Image: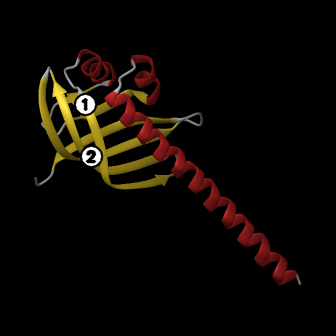
Amino acid sequence: MKKWLILVVAFWGSTLGCFAQSQNSIKLVNAVQEFTQLMIHPDEAQLKKITHKKLSYGHSSGRQEDQNTFISSLMTGKSDFVTINLNEQSYDVVDDIGIARHILVAETNDNGVPGNVKIGVLMIWRDTGESWKLLARQAYKVPQ
């Protein structure tokens, strides 16, 4: 009976750990989805809330932006996403760090010039306890 009780307690503990991990992963996926919508429909206050103050935002061209420059680019239309589809998504959570990868396929209108983009993206998120915040993002070119 004692062995059975130990087994049940061990299983219950591992299930709770998996449940917490799963809940955190779901919150990360939701944060990426919210961020994607904010790139299409930028809102300065919401972008500031979902990004870390030390944001490092890398474009596939090599251009780097901090939080203020990134938000300004979206608000002024320098970067303008009309549509965004995320393909080949993967997510992993390690402690308070979230790693999101995907292929971003989008219609753009940067500075009023229509275009299309297909890039790979690696995002690093940090769980603040209240929400996930985007800490770093690096885009890279993929074969067309």
Q: Position of residue 49 (x, y in %)?
A: 47, 24
Lateral position of residue 68 relative to residue 8, left or right: left
Q: Position of residue 122 (x, y in %)?
A: 30, 47
Answer with the quarter of the image where residue 75 lies. Answer: top left
Q: Position of residue 141 (x, y in %)?
A: 14, 47
Whichever of callouts 2 and 1 sits on the residue coming sooner in the sequence is 1
Say which mark, if any, is on residue 47.
none
Mark 1 element type: strand
Residue at 28% in and 22% down: 74
Q: Is residue 143 visible?
A: yes
Residue at 39% in and 17% down: 44
136 vs 70, nearest the viewer: 70
Q: Is 121 drawn above or below residue 38 in the view shown?
A: below
Q: Is residue 95 visible?
A: no
Answer with the quarter of the image where residue 77 lies. Answer: top left
Q: Is 70 drawn above or below residue 5 in the view shown?
A: above
Say which mark, if any, is on residue 121.
2
Mark 2 element type: strand
The residue beneath circle 1 is: 81
Q: Residues within 10 Å of mark 1 (few under 14, many from 20)?
A: many
Mark 1 belongs to which amino acid?
Answer: Phe
Q: Position of residue 22 (x, y in %)?
A: 57, 56
Q: Where is the N terminus found, in terms of image quarters?
A: bottom right
Q: Are marks 2 and 1 in contact (CB under 8 Å)?
A: no
- Looking at the image, which residue sits at the far right? 1
Residue at 52% in and 51% down: 25
Residue at 25% in and 31% down: 82
Q: Residues within 10 Å of mark 2 (few under 14, many from 20)?
A: many
Mark 2 belongs to which amino acid?
Answer: Val
Q: Is 28 drawn above or below residue 11 in the view shown?
A: above
Lateral position of residue 38 relative to residue 80, left or right: right
Mark closer to the observer (2, 1): 1
